[in-house]
Image (spheres, coloured by chain):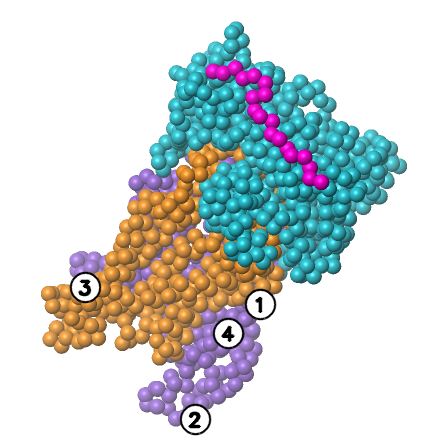
Chain colours: A cyan, B purple, C orange
Amino acid sequence: MTAPPADAVTPARTAALAVRDLHVDFDGPEGPVPAVRGVDLTLNPGEVLGLVGESGSGKSTVALAAMGLLPRTARVRGSVLAGGTELLGAGEKALSRLRGSRVAMVFQDPLSALTPVHRIGDQIAEAVRVHQDVTREQARRRAVELLDLVGIPDPARRARAYPHEFSGGMRQRAVIAMAVANDPDVILADEPTTALDVTVQAQILDVLRTARRETGAALLLVSHDLGVIAGMADRVAVMYAGRVVESAPVDALFAAPRMPYTIGLLGAVPRPDTGGRPLTPVPGSPPDLRKLSGGCPFAPRCPLADDACGDEPALTGTGDDHDHLAACVKTPGPGLYPVPEIPPATAGAEAPRSERPAVLRVQGLAKTFPVFKGTAFRRRVGSVYAVDGIDLDIRRGETLGLVGESGSGKSTALMEILRLAAPEAGEVEILGRSAAGLTKRQAHALRGSVQIVFQDPMASLDPRMPVGEIVAEPLRAQGHGRADAAGRIPRLLELVGLEAAHADRFPHEFSGGQRQRIGIARALAVEPELLVLDEPVSALDVSVQAGVLNLLQRLKRELGLAYLFVSHDLAVVRHIADRVSVMYLGRTVESGPVEEVFARPRHPYTQALLSAVPVPDPSRERARERILLAGDPPSPAVRDEGCRFRGRCPLYAALGDAERSRCEGVRPAPRSLGGDQVAACHFAAG
Amino acid sequence: MSPTVLAYLTKRLGYYALLLAVAVFLSYVLSSLALSPRGYFEGRQPPPPAASVEAQLTELGINDHTPLMERFGTWVSHAVRGDFGRTIDSSSVGEEFGRRIGVSLRLLFAGTLLGTVAGILAGAWGALRQYRFSDRAVTVFAFLLLSTPTFLLAVLLKLGAMKVNQAAGTELISFTGEKTPGLSGSAGTLLGDRAAHLLLPTLSIALGTAAAYSRYQRGTMLDVLGSDFLRTARAKGLTHRRAVLTHGLRTALVPMSTFFAYGFLALFTGAAFTEKIFGWHGMGSWFIDAIGKSDVNSVVAVNVFAAVMVLLSGFLADVLHAALDPRVRTS
Amino acid sequence: MTTTATVPTADPAASAPPAARGRGRVALRRFAANRNALTGAVVLLLLFLLAFAGPYLTPWSHTDIDYSALREAPSADHWWGTNRIGQDVYAQVLHGLQKSLLIGLLTALTATVLASVVGACAGYFGGWTDRIMTFFIDLLLVFPAFLIIAIVSPRLRERGWIVFVGLLAVFGWMITARVVRSMTRSLKEREFVRAAQLMGVHPLRIIARHILPNVSSFLIVDATIAVGGAVMSETGLSYFGFGVQPPDVSLGTLIADGSDAALTYPWMFFFAAGLLVVFVLAVNFLGDGLRDALDPTSGHHRTRRRPRRKGTTHDRAAR
């Protein structure tokens, strides 16, 4: 035993779930690889325990180990008690009696969590019948009730649907329905909303609250999202390198974190409610668990680390505070992490906005995709109106945040803009030149002025090319000689915080943050004026993300770049953008300066979107009024004469018949609502 | 069946018809150019008079003095009415076909069925016991069978049977033809005789089929075993075994539908060897003999049959896929 | 942020730069750990040695006839015996093995090159290019390959075995091309290809620099297994007299000649048959091992596929 039970308040026997000294190793080609290294957790009946950590911290492994659902390559030691029953080492038969009935689980990826070949209702009914002695018919009826409970409209009909006919959010509801089918004492939710859009995330979190209310179950909520944790958890445990490094009631943890890692995490996460605050990235990246030295695993990244950190610290409280435990021998003060310096803007970008030249102007852009049936003789059966009227305006030295959920057409819009050809409808003007009139040669030359950075740094770098060649590729495509291109590589790599010597390595030798820096270096190689950033940090951990965001801000100021920053993460947009443009189902619904839009959203969709974003601040989260949108966005394959949002619009629901007919029949035009702010809504308040 | 599925299937059939038409045309042209029925007739002993050869060739519609396109036109105009002409020995191709197809089917049916079922079971079992001794043994055995060409397997089986018969001093295992010629007796005796003749061909087909399917099934099964939905099923409280049976096996069979369909086709080519070696007079041996006799009409007929089989397999794969996978049905 | 339930080190992002020195080494280590594959590689090497160096060890060539030794059992003079007209079986089998190996290698190489070019172009360019190439692929699949080769090859007898290689290759690339096509289509959606497109890199250059290197693992594995397949087809056709023609010999013709006398004069049959099976088996083991080593998405080395976070992928799925 290395540490005393993390929270010895409740004895393990009466806890809903008690994890004691849990170790998990995975068999690797070179011996066992530790993933969890001595974790103690106590989940009291009815409470919500948030388990926070970045990728590789072992948080999901803890949840899966508790259920006995780890793959066969896992070696698990320690103890997991569920209501006094030991789960570790129990046989598959005994475990399967507990799984689903006493302890239930909700998984991260709803798209793959359901068996594709069985009906949703049958899969839920199966969960009922495994543990309860009921007839097939009774189980089926119960499944419909459960679907109703988790908020699926028309449950009797939807129960007969197959998983692929459900949206991601609806599938997650179905999985939750399965989890609560047998009234469990404990629900383990492993990143239940990570794969979902923010408005759907708000719905699912609400369903989880309902599920808890109905069953009285305790909830272990595993998440990387500090905002989600702040809004849901009673207590929080922070994991790092396979151990719990801090554990405290939610308010104490967010208000007065004690472990430098937690402090770093909170300083690195952008918040949707306060902009402009510089983010303080945590230097370095998480350790390789195979190569731990035996000291504090955070020491290599910790500004306070000294000789005293040579032994791995135990999780302890201070004085008589037994609720707030931290694994750190130091007492961190304020200003632990240095605040990065963002250089002032270069001359030219300082001029008033209206005097600066437009880098990108988009007016009424539209793009439809044909829908085909059949594979051999394909026949067009309809159209998807993926982009159906988008307006954008970016001036020199400015960042425009383009915000929208899945299916809003953000990426399609990007591709249409970057195609540098005449759009299907509307106008695209880059650096003052209309894309419609470009010759092939002109378009090719213009490609040098507009570059893109993609979401997934692994996918956007060819795994078979050394970094030097990757960065040189746009130069070569623009006709630079091999030697000339090679000569520029070292400076480019240094510009983004890498070393010139890295040019010979391959992408897989770098961490996620470094890879994204390579992507940025490649984009900068041809000295563009506009950088299109397609979800550039959404694949990165918070502590790494902050570093990349700071880099982008620095580059913008130093090089006078303009950014089109596409993101689903409103907190990030709030942090980095000067202006914001909100999309819904292919149309721009609101745009304006970022402070104004975030402070006073005018369009009902923007209002709902902003209210759905979790804030990493428990007291604020609890006090917030949420606008929960009903359902999912409708199909973009339906051409709508009126407002595309009205089906989910809370404002529309409150309107009279005459006014409603306007929403149904007349497409709302962008309307200026004071200053620079524009919203496409007939009834938005001025 | 929903209208969308029906429409989809109709479209598929249209495409197939186009493919078939082009394939048949090319087969006819190739066969006519490559084979020389004139040479076959002229090589007879005693050499027939030139006029008679000419007349016979014209009669059969394979006279190389008639322009190729004209010959093809005549052939098509008969073929669409179901008349595939006459063999070089002047019997009806259609009748020959009817006789041969029955022989081939009797030869293939038991072996295919047995091989498919055994292969799927062995594959699923191997996947569940991945890396244990039994899995390794099945794997090595399957590889050994896959590395033995069909004709060699058939020859080896035949040699084995000969050894057994030698040792027993009597013909325990028969390996020539479909039945013992001239054998009379009760229905039971005759049936037993047929079964004895079927043993080796069935085995040679079943072994190869089973080996191939066991590899495919093991692969799809391993994919499914690591899937999230299987984990969900276990999280509901299903034991590993039950989760695999109710959720895994069904899903793992979906990608197999393609293999079922095309396996059918591969068999037909394999059957040519099997038929020839075990002396069955089915489609395969007909084809090989027809080439030897430059029998253009027979060769083309077998080609058409084979092409139809391929297309049918593809069609069958689609239907099976749609039946097994709800995702295909709606999209 | 993604989470994973499997081995954390499977994520290369977690390991420090010096940890891995190229995927080549990883592949090599995985390959070396696979005993079947290693055995296969060694056996193949030995077979090649035997086929190309072996004939120099005996004074007999495959056409020599020793009238003093008909149907003779293996002896010091004729190591693997003689056949019914007094030819040395060792020399004949080795010559046949040589021919079969050459035919197999050339066929697999030609077919793979054809498949990768057609598949990559069809998948990358899409539209009418794709439709025409797909029709062509389907057409060749509808053609009963075995039958067509059987019809045509006797006609091309005089041109020698190289024509036979061409025929086998022409009917042996379609399935591979289909796979390459679908791999290309998904690669085309990958961001690094998109990035290259948006930089203005020429399509053919994208195919050569990004698409083909990324399907190379599959192609290597497929070509390996295709060697086995080609040898099986060759021997099968030759067995019936549709392949290699006398006086040339291949394993197929040797097996055909020896099978009738297999019980009385086993050496005429079993050396050729045994070498054939051993060769194909070795190729299959090697291919299987290469697949595990090179292709991280196949078989048991796979790690759980991580769901991407929301954003671009869903937008594209809307198409």
Q: Residue C261 placed where, x, y %?
A: 20, 68
Q: Are marks 1 and 4 on the same chain?
A: yes
Q: Earlier in the sequence, mark 2 or mark 4?
A: 4
Q: Residue A246 placed where, x, y %?
A: 52, 19
Judge the density around disc 4: few (<14), some (14-19), many (≥20) Cα neighbours within 10 Å: some
Q: Are marks 4 and 3 on the same chain?
A: no
Give the residue pinned by disc 1.
B18
Give the left or right position of residue A260, taking residue B214 as reference: right
Q: Are marks 4 and 3 in contact (CB under 8 Å)?
A: no
Residues in magenta?
A: A329-347
Determine the chain carrying the residue at label 1: B
Which image quadrant for residue B277? bottom left
Separation of marks 1 and 3 at Cα, in angstroms: 51 Å
Determine the chain carrying the residue at label 2: B
Give the residue pinned by disc 4.
B26
Which image quadrant for residue A109? top right
Give the residue pinned by disc 2.
B51
Q: Is residue B55 visible?
A: yes
Residue A342 falls inside the magenta stretch: yes
Judge the density around disc 3: few (<14), some (14-19), many (≥20) Cα neighbours within 10 Å: some
Callout in the foreground (2, 4): 4
Say which element carries label 4. Answer: helix
Q: Earlier in the sequence, mark 1 or mark 4?
A: 1
Disc number for residue C266 = 3
Front-most of A490 and C203?
Answer: A490
Say which element carries label 2. Answer: helix
Three-letter amino acid code at disc 1?
Answer: Leu
